[in-house]
């Protein structure tokens, strides 16, 4: 079964420190994409970073990096130098490609609280 | 550059009624997906529209239907509303045939069914 698992319901991090949010995935597809989204209390989902299954290097976008370990089927998000504005829900998502069309699966999310 | 827009922002309906939610994709995008997000949960994929056709569907009953117009905007219709349909409904757009097919989300419509 295709599934995204986020095992950390909530995380705390001190301002200016780094934090890792865990994500494991399950799919038998060879081609897939992995995404991280941020959802502030306002509700809008904000795209952070993307990793393709064939990408050899870990993706980075500013303070965000994705630690992609294909053999372990994990795609952890690392936020460096946390800021108060990083407090939000974070969702890991996977894009699979059944029958030539895309389908997206989201995890249950991790609530991050950055402490001053 | 206009992002994804959704209307209305909030909606209150009673059981058994029907509702229509609307979405305009980000400029340049041609694909629209709809998601249901219950309180405290991750988004659940409802369906995706491309070239005015439903291309992929999640595990939602036929009470959930949609449409995509020639200008790529989309509607989500829900018939015979149930209390359990109360949720945030998110629309996401993307440009098909790009390497990442990254989806960009709108602010959502919060539906309350009484």
Image (cartoon, coloured by chain):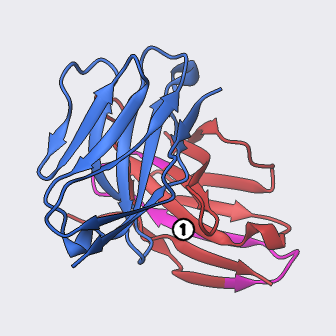
Chain colours: A blue, B red
- Where residue B72 appears, as percent x and y from the top left, is 44, 52
Residue B19 shown in magenta: yes
Q: Secondary structure at mark 1?
A: strand
- Looking at the image, is A25 positioned above or below residue B62? above
Q: Nearer the viewer, residue B95 or A44?
A: A44
Q: Is residue A1 visible?
A: yes
- Looking at the image, is A105 positioned above or below residue A74? below
Horizontal side of B95 relative to B50 (left or right) equals left
The residue under label 1 is: B22
- Where residue B21 appears, as percent x and y from the top left, is 60, 69
Q: Nearer the viewer, residue A47 or A62?
A: A62
Q: Residue at x 57, y 55 (%)?
A: B35
Q: Nearer the viewer, residue A102 or A104?
A: A104
Q: Quadrant of residue A111?
A: bottom left
Looking at the figure, which quarter contains the C terminus of chain A? bottom left
Provide the chain ID for the residue under circle 1: B
| Number of numbered discs | 1
Looking at the figure, which quarter contains the N terminus of chain A? top right
Residue B82 shown in magenta: no
Q: Residue at x 65, y 76 (%)?
A: B111
Q: Is residue B52 visible?
A: no
Q: Residue at x 58, y 76 (%)?
A: B110
Horizontal side of B43 relative to B77 (left or right) equals left
- Looking at the image, is A52 positioned above or below residue B79? above
| Residue segment shown in magenta | B12-32
Q: Residues within 10 Å of mark 1 (few under 14, many from 20)?
A: many
- Looking at the image, is A56 positioned above or below residue B12? above
- Where residue A93 appears, as percent x and y from the top left, is 45, 42
Horizontal side of A116 relative to B31 (left or right) equals left
Horizontal side of A40 relative to B90 (left or right) equals left
Q: Residue at x 56, y 54 (%)?
A: B34
């Amino acid at each position: 079964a295709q599934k995204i698992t986020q095992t950390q319901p909530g995380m705390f991090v001190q301002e200016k420190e780094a934090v890792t949010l865990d994500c494991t995935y399950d799919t038998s597809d060879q081609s897939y994409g992995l995404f991280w989204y941020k959802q502030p209390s306002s509700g809008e989902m904000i795209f952070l970073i993307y990793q393709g299954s064939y990408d050899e290097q870990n993706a980075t976008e500013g303070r965000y990096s994705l630690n992609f370990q294909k053999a372990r089927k994990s795609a952890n998000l690392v936020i460096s130098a946390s800021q108060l504005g990083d407090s939000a829900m974070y969702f890991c998502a996977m894009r699979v490609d059944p029958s030539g069309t895309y389908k997206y699966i989201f995890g249950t999310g991790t609530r991050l609280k950055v402490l001053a | 550059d206009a992002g994804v827009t959704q209307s209305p922002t909030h909606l209150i309906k009673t059981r058994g009624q029907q509702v229509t939610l609307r979405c305009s994709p980000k400029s340049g995008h041609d694909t629209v997906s709809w998601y249901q997000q219950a309180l405290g949960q991750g988004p659940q994929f409802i369906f995706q529209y491309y070239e005015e056709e439903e291309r992929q569907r999640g595990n939602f009953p036929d009470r959930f239907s949609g449409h995509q117009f020639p200008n790529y905007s989309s509607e989500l219709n829900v018939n015979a509303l149930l209390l359990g349909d109360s949720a945030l409904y998110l629309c996401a757009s993307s440009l098909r045939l790009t390497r990442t097919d990254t989806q960009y989300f709108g602010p959502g419509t919060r539906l309350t069914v009484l």
